[in-house]
Image: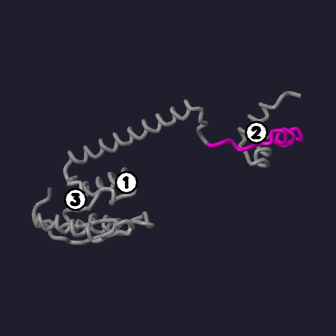
Amino acid sequence: MVAATARVALYNTLSPTDSDPERAFRELRAFAAARAFRVAAEFVDRGFPDPHRPQRAHLLETVVEGKLVDLVAVWRLERFGRSLHDIVATIDHIVRSGVGFFSVQENLDFSGPVARQFMIAFVQAQQHFFAERAHAGFAAAKARGVKLGRPRKPIDAAAVQADYDRGFSLRECARLHGISHSTVIRVLHDQPEK
């Protein structure tokens, strides 16, 4: 953890479901006061519908890059980014810039190298878990006879064959019927021989 009297930047993203929008900042300020940190800046994004979080970008570009604070404190990790990967990459950027990072609700200090390694391992485990769940879901659907993937576009095979027989090239047939070159080849191959 950073030393007492450190300068801290507080950040939160508000959700439209927040019944008390000030709650997060009360808790963030209490966190700073309990450790004798000086609040250097507060940043709040409305979050919805703006997924770009302009205040977070300002925090990263101005405060972190300019070394104007010693610590960034957020109310909850889920409020700090758009995805798990985004959160991890941004925290890693902050810590590599020499600024600490703390999540108040989870009571997690990401300032040290061990915390960074844990976070990276956690993200890799999450990605592996989601991939396994997706594969299991696909296998179960396939076992039930569900056709996976995008449904095939209906193709008038006779019209494709007729255009090809009239002298249109494979590419011209593809363009005329709004299908790919390889689909034209497949359609022609599947037609019964005359």
**Of circles 3 and 2, which is in front?**
3
Residue 133 position by quadrant:
top left
Q: Is residue 98 visible?
A: no
Which residue is painted at 48% across and 37% down in the image? Answer: 137
Q: CA distance from mark 1 to mark 2?
A: 42 Å
What is the number of the mark on residue 104?
A: 3
The magenta region covers 150-169
Residue labelled with disc 1: 86
Choose between 168 and 25: the one closer to the eye: 25
Tell me the distance, in whole angstroms, between the alpha carbons under discs 1 and 3. 19 Å
Q: Is residue 118 magenta?
A: no
User: Residue 175, position in %: x, y?
Assistant: 76, 48
The N terminus lies in which quarter of the figure?
bottom left
Amino acid identity at mark 2: Val
Q: Is residue 91 above or below residue 5?
A: above
Q: Quadrant of the C terminus?
A: top right
Left-right relation of 124 to 71: right
Numbered disc in front, either 1 or 3: 3
Residue drawn at x 21%, y 66% is 27
Q: Mark 3 and 2 residues: CB-CB less than 8 Å, in contact?
A: no
**Badge 1: how crowded within 10 Å, few (<14), some, or many (20+)?**
few
Q: Earlier along the polypeptide chain: callout 3 or callout 2?
A: 3
Q: Earlier in the sequence, mark 1 or mark 3?
A: 1
Q: Which residue is mark 2?
A: 184
- 91 horizontally vs 16: left or right: left
Q: Residues within 10 Å of mark 3 (few under 14, many from 20)?
A: some
Q: Is residue 164 magenta?
A: yes
Q: Amino acid at mark 1?
A: Asp
The percent coordinates of residue 80 (x first, y second) are 33, 59
